[in-house]
Image (spheres, rainbow, N blue to C red):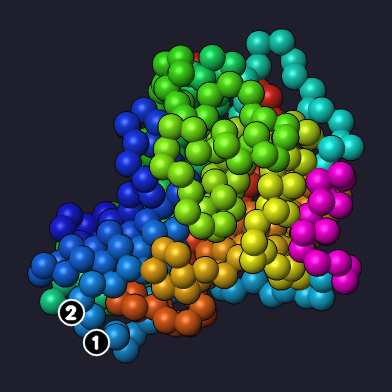
């Protein structure tokens, strides 16, 4: 992260003990210019010339024909029934919720009109107890650059170019303090629960973002997964994107909302396992313009792969 340039921060203000670790935004402050990129979109206050050199970004996923001719709302409800019919995960005595995910974020720096960007891979692991205590471990892998010149410039400005790891412990009620207690198993109740203690959502895409954030920090049982899918089915503007192989090599069905609520038009996509109704991944793609970001269009600027959701012992 470069001091005074573009940095990643949580998408909404929250106490350090309950920060939103998976929902990110870019905030740029250079020469009096402010550019906010929230959940994959840009709010532009001062425009500069676009950069001719594009940053390295993850490859676009390839979407195939839909699994059925059903509209998104119908198909998601059908997948909710699949989710509800799954067996509950076994929970040995003395275990806690354990989740792991692989995440990629675009991190950019702008100085004197020049944008330097890197794709930052991160590995997240978390453990959560029944009383809302927990542990969170973040391993940031070496950033990926478009060129060696970008790498040198990034390093010159103080940016990290190697791996780093951070572990944070939470006492009872601190880990995601706004999402305490059992996750509701009813879609309407879940919609209300997701905004407990935070500003009310103004756009459908915010509920999609909350569901994807939830999947990264709480272990959902079959009925809770079904409620999440039914909530997605109710969102205005959600469409079928098609079948897809996700970034971990798993077959899924994708559903998207295209929105400019956060600034620039972007497509927000969830990938669902058709065999279990589990959430496999989440993608944010700029679709029309990149603003001051030196990325091609379309451009993946965030993606997450949910890899582990199980009960396991709390690490010592």
Residue 51 in the image: above or below residue 186: below
- Kindly identify the residue that appears in the image at 77 percent across and 41 percent down: 226
**How far is the residue under mark 1 from the one under mark 2?**
8 Å
- Kindly identify the residue that appears in the image at 48 percent across and 49 percent down: 201
Residue 225 in the image: above or below residue 287: above
* Residue 83 in picture, x, y percent from top left: 82, 42
Label placed on residue 202: none
Q: Secondary structure at mark 1?
A: loop
Pick whichever of labels 1 and 2 is earlier in the sequence: 1
Front residue of 72 and 63: 72
Q: Is residue 109 highlighted in magenta? A: no
Magenta span of residues: 67-82
Front residue of 208 and 304: 208
Packing grade of label 1 (10 A; few <14, some 14-19, many >=20) is few
Quickly name the residue at label 2: 113
* Residue 211 in picture, x, y percent from top left: 60, 46
Lateral position of residue 230 relative to residue 47, left or right? right
Res 206 visible? yes
Lateral position of residue 247 relative to residue 179, left or right? right
Labelled pair 1, 2 in contact (Cβ < 8 Å): yes
Quickly name the residue at label 1: 49
Q: Nearer the viewer, mark 1 or mark 2?
A: 1
Residue 316 in the image: above or below residue 153: above
Lateral position of residue 90 relative to residue 46, left or right? right
Quarter occupied by the N terminus: bottom left
Front residue of 93 and 272: 272
- Kindly identify the residue that appears in the image at 70 percent across and 40 percent down: 187
Res 143 visible? no
Q: Secondary structure at mark 2?
A: loop
Packing grade of label 2 (10 A; few <14, some 14-19, many >=20) is some
Which secondary structure type mostly characterizes the magenta part of the structure? helix
Outermost top residue: 93
């Amino acid at each position: 992260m470069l001091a005074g340039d573009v940095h990643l921060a949580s998408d909404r203000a929250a106490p350090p003990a309950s920060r939103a670790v998976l929902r990110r935004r870019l905030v740029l402050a250079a020469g009096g210019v402010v550019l906010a990129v929230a959940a994959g979109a840009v709010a532009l206050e001062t425009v500069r010339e676009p950069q001719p050199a594009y940053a390295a970004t993850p490859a676009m996923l390839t979407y195939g024909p839909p699994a059925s001719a059903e509209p998104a709302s119908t198909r998601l409800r059908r997948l909710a029934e699949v989710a509800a019919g799954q067996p509950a995960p076994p929970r040995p005595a003395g275990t806690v919720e354990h989740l792991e995910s692989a995440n990629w974020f675009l991190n950019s720096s702008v100085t004197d009109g020049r944008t330097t960007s890197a794709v930052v891979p991160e590995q997240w692991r978390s453990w959560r107890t029944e009383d809302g205590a927990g542990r969170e471990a973040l391993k940031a892998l070496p950033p990926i650059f478009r060129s060696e010149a970008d790498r040198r410039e990034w390093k010159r400005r103080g940016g990290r170019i190697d791996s780093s790891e951070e572990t944070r412990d939470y006492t009872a009620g601190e880990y995601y303090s706004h999402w305490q207690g059992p996750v509701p198993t009813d879609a309407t109740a879940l919609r209300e629960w997701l905004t407990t203690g935070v500003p009310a959502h103004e756009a459908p895409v915010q509920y999609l973002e909350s569901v994807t954030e939830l999947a990264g920090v709480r272990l959902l049982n079959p009925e809770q997964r079904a409620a999440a899918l039914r909530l997605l089915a109710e969102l205005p503007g959600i469409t079928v994107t098609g079948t897809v192989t996700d970034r971990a090599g798993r077959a899924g069905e994708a559903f998207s909302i295209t929105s400019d609520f956060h600034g620039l038009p972007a497509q927000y996509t969830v990938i669902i396992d058709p065999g279990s109704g589990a959430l496999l991944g989440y993608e944010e793609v700029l679709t029309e313009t990149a603003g001051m970001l030196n990325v091609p269009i379309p451009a993946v600027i965030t993606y997450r792969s949910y890899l582990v959701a199980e009960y396991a012992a709390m690490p010592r």
